[in-house]
Image (cartoon, helix red, strand yellow):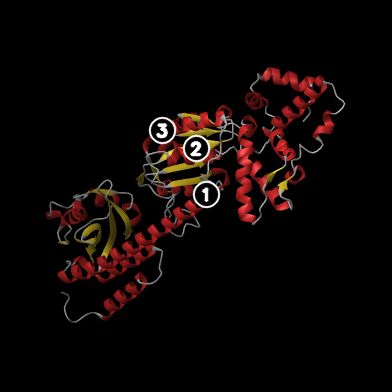
Amino acid sequence: MIRSKIDPKKLETLIEINALINSNYTDVKVLLTKIIESATRLTSGEASSLILVNPENNKLYFEIALGSKGPDVKKYSLKMGEGIAGWVAANNKSLIVNDVESDSRFYSDISKKVGFPTSSILAVPMRLRDRCVGVIEIINKKDRKNFTDEDLQWLEIFSDQAAIAIQNAKSYQRVQEEIFLLKDQIHAERGYHTFIGDSRIIKEKLEIAMRAARTESSVLLLGESGVGKELFAEQIHFNSQRRNNPFIRVNCAALPVNLIESELFGHVKGAFTDASSDRRGRFELADTGTIFLDEIGDIPLSVQAKLLRVLQERTFEKVGSSEPLRVDVRIIAATNKDMEEAVEKGAFRIDLFYRLNVLPIYIPPLRERRDDIPLLASHFLEKFNSEIKKQIKGFTPEAMEALLSYIWPGNVRELENAIERAVVITQDDYIKPAALILQSYSGNREDYSNRTLKEAVNLFKKQFIKNILEQNNWKQTKTAKMLGIQRTYLSRLIKELEINR
């Protein structure tokens, strides 16, 4: 026990830190640094470290290192049982070594590499439920004095405080992750988990997705914007062995270029100007589960190399850190871009493309599966009837004809928006064509009146091809692929039908 006469300054420091621990103080790194600074000052040490045990690889990492060589020390790690700190962690016991050169447990490599001579060490374990989760180590007592049993007892009190701070931080982090996952689940429950489709082609694609779900391979979902690639990603996850683990969605196109690396892989405090605390990235949150990278083609080249490493080795470093993290994540990517064209132009790494393209699944556009339109329209009508508090019974035959004859450049997403608008506008029992506001439908019949069959067919071809060209930014190779014809034949049709941009 500490002698009955307690130093008022030491007691004041303990009370101050306890108050911080019991407050709503969420920056655990700053709090731990305060604890180590106080422990170093009150034990008269020249330098100190807080070293955490990683139970996954049984190694010790320098979380905090104070002193003139602190930044250099943080680059290193220890094996369990290696050095004084490793021995303390392995045996879960405190240790005073006032002559390190005469102690066989002393590991001199780090001291020599950073150029900080070490003569004495005081080290104590940090315990959570009697399990050692880290070590606090004080290096060299000032004026070349020896560390005492009283120093050790004070340091053990500080180690208890540090352990409580870590436990509080883990609890807070766990709650934050649960909130994140609950938000994700709520997002999914708002219609995302309802898979609607009964056409032959969509059933074939769904069967391919089910076979992919039984593997651990990466999947690349291809198709136009709005076809439902996210729904296919969900079906793959929810039919896989990872179904009870996290499913994390990332829209790569929506992330600012300067923040995408931090969003995906996390960062440590001080990694950049606004990094006021450590942050876990989406890959870390998706550990043991699935991460869905939508619009993968928008990831900048600077981040693609790091993504390739995750695919190959399942490891990465947070922004601002050199310590590798290992994750067990299944990757499903999606894009509406021509990835082969992006590779040819040098905008996307070919090795990353091959890694992602292990199981490619092309999701057909809505115009290629018109049998699904009545089913989808009824589903969206029911959904918006409930949300907008209406009781619309269905669609007039003319409205359904309009839905079936429309080209749907925006696919299922555009259909959903059209039905929502119609529900808002409609005051009758049934939705009429005018309420759908489909631009290409209005006046369509008049365009074909008083024309020969050949003229009507050519007009339809012209309108149809122009719509697909506009959808693909007038890229003929991609348009020809979607139309199922040769590029040379498309060029001839553009000339013959006088299709102008």
| Comes first in the chain, label 2 or label 3 | 3
In what quadrant of the picture does the C terminus appear? top right
Check contact, mark 2 vs mark 1: CB within 8 A.
no
Q: Quadrant of residue 485?
A: top right
| Comes first in the chain, label 3 or label 1 | 3
Q: Amino acid at mark 3?
A: Ser
Pick whichever, 496 or 58, lies toward us. Answer: 496
Q: Amino acid at mark 2?
A: Ala
Secondary structure category for the residue under label 1? loop
* Residue drawn at (64%, 32%) of the image: 370
Where's residue 247, x and y in %? 44, 46
The reply to whether residue 147 is visible in this rendering is yes
Q: Amino acid at mark 1?
A: Leu
- Disc 1 marks which residue? 259
- Disc 3 marks which residue? 217
Pick whichever, 143 or 128, lies toward us. Answer: 128
| Comes first in the chain, label 2 or label 1 | 1
Q: On the picture, is 419 further left or further right than 28?
A: right
* Residue drawn at (60%, 44%) of the image: 379
Where's residue 39, x and y in %? 27, 68
Q: Quadrant of residue 478?
A: top right
Pick whichever, 262 or 111, lies toward us. Answer: 262
Where's residue 256, x and y in %? 56, 48
Label of residue 333 in the image: 2
Label 2, label 1: how many angstroms apart (C-alpha)? Answer: 19 Å
* Residue drawn at (35%, 45%) of the image: 324
Where's residue 47, x and y in %? 28, 61
Label 2, label 3: how many angstroms apart (C-alpha)? Answer: 11 Å
Pick whichever, 185 or 325, lies toward us. Answer: 185
Q: Nearer the viewer, mark 2 or mark 1?
A: 2
